[in-house]
Amino acid sequence: MQLNLNACQLKADCVSKSRPLKLIAFGLESKRIAHKPKVTIQAFTKSRITMNVIADEQKYILQTYGRTPIVISHGHGSKIYDFDGKEYIDLAAGIAVNALGHNNELWIETLRDQASRVAHTSNLYHTIPQVELAKRLVETSFGDKAFFCNSGTEANEGALKFSRKYARVKAGVDAYDPAAQAPYEIVSFSSCFHGRTMGALALTYKQQYKTPFFPMMPGSVLAKYNDLESAAAVIKKGKTAAVFVEPVQGEGGCNPATVEFLQGLRRLCDEAGALLVFDEVQCGLGRTGTLWAHQRYGVEPDIMTVAKPLANGLPIGACLLKQHVADVMKPGDHGSTFAGNPLVCRAACAVFDQISQPAFLAAVEAKGEYLRKQLREALGSDPRVVEVRGMGLLVGVQLNTPAGPLVDAARDEGVLAITAGKGDVLRLVPPLVITNEEIDEAVAAIARALARLPMPPKQK
C-alpha cells in the first residue's frame, strides 16, 4: 500500500517533548497543529513512509536537487523532526531562511489573520501590508525606496536592471533607444553567489553553475574578493555600470569582507560613476548581529538586495534603492505579479518587528561569538580543521578535506548542516533564536561526527 500524502491529511497532537513521535492519518477533519507536535501514521511503517515519499519525489519532480534521504515532518524553534521520529538541531535553517525558527507563534497568528482577509491582489492596487513593510525597510536603512519581488535571485535581477538603466540615463542617452551606448559592465567577485536566473547567474563565480547554459549575459566581469587592486583594474569610468558584492559571502565560504575592501569599493564606484550594490540576501536582516551586515563597515550602497529570512520561509525578495537610482525608473520598467502581496508582506512585518529589536540583535551577535568559540575549542585540535570564521550566526568551518562526509555524519548525530566554498566548508546558519544549550549540543554532535570520519591518507 503506497502512501498518498495528497489523499491523506495529517493530524498532529500537542504532546510533551518526552513522548514518542505520533502521526495519525485521518479524513477531511482539520485541526490546528500545535507546538512540538509528535505524530505516527497508522498502516505505514516509518521506513515505508520515507521510502515512498522519496520514490515519488524521484518519479514526479525534476531532479535538480541532491536531496538528503530524510522526509521532514515538522519543527519547533531550532529543532526539526523527520517522519522516522528523529530529532535534529537545525543549523541549516532552510539555507539561512528560517530566522525565527519553526512554528513561531506571532508569525503563525499573523498569517492566519491575513489569510482570512486577503492574500493576493497583484500590484494593480494599494495594500496596507506592502506599504507597512516598505516603511520598515526604508526607515531602518540607507534606502529611500523599496521594490518587492519573490526571491533573492529576482532581487538581484531587479538590481541589474536598475543599474543598467541608471547608467543609460546618466550617460545622457535615450534609455529606450536600442542603438544608444552607455556603460553596461557589471563587476562581481571570486567565490560570490548571486542567484541562478540568467542575469544573476552571469555574475556568480562557480563555473559549473554557468557552463551548461552558455552563452551568459554579456558584460559581467570578475575580480578577486577582498583585493582592491584587482577591483581597481576592472572598475572603469565609461565601462562599469555597477559593482555587486556580498558584505559577508555565504555560499562562497562564509567569508567576511574587510572594512578596507568595502570602503575602497565605495571610493572606486564614486570615481567611476558606477553604482555599488550590496547583496545581503543571506547575510542581511540580523544574521550577522546587526540589522544589515554593511552597517558594521561604515559604508552605504546605492542598492541593496534582501530576501531569505525576510518572511521566515514565505517567498519574498526586495531591493532597497537610494533616490537617485529610484528617479530613473518609470511605471512599466519592471514588475511582478506575485511580489509584495498582502500575505507575505504582513508575515514579513511580523518577522522584521521581532528581529529588529536591539536586544534580539545583541543576542545574535553574542550567540555567534559563542558558537565560533565552542567550535574552535571542540574542533581546533583536529588536523582537518583549518579555520573557524564568520560573522554573527553565519559561520563556516574551513576543512582541508571535503565537507560532505561531515555533513552526513553530523546528520546521523542529529544535526543538520550544509556545505559552502569549494565543498570544503561546513556552513552553519541556524535560526537566530537558537539557544546556547542547543549550540553546545550541536557542537558536541559535530565533534563526534568528525571523530568518526577516517583521517585522509598522508600526502607523500
Image (cartoon, rainbow, N blue to C red):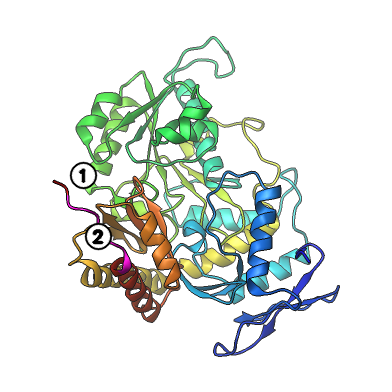
Front-most of residues 430 and 164: 430
Which residue corresponds to the image point at 32% horizontal and 76% vertical from the top-left? 444
User: Counting other residues with Cα less than 10 Å from the Cα at mark 2, is it few (<14), some (14-19), or many (20 or more)?
Assistant: few
State which region is magenta: 452-458
Examine the image and state in which quarter residue 389 appears: bottom left
Task: Single out the residue that lies furthest toward the left.
Answer: 460
Any mark on residue 270, and which? none
Residue denoted by label 1: 260
Q: Secondary structure at mark 1?
A: helix
Name the quarter where the N terminus is drawn.
Answer: bottom right
Which residue corresponds to the image point at 32% horizontal and 21% vertical from the top-left? 237
Which residue corresponds to the image point at 45% horizontal and 24% vertical from the top-left? 167
181 sits left or right of 260 in the view? right
- Residue 426 in percent (x, y) is at 35, 58
Any mark on residue 455, and which? 2
Q: Secondary structure at mark 2?
A: loop
- Residue type at mark 2: give it: Met
Task: Single out the residue that lies furthest toward the top.
Answer: 179
333 sits left or right of 172 in the view? right
105 sits left or right of 242 in the view? right
- Residue 140 in percent (x, y) is at 45, 57
Q: CA distance from mark 1 to mark 2?
A: 38 Å
| Among numbered discs 1 and 2, the one appearing first in the sequence | 1
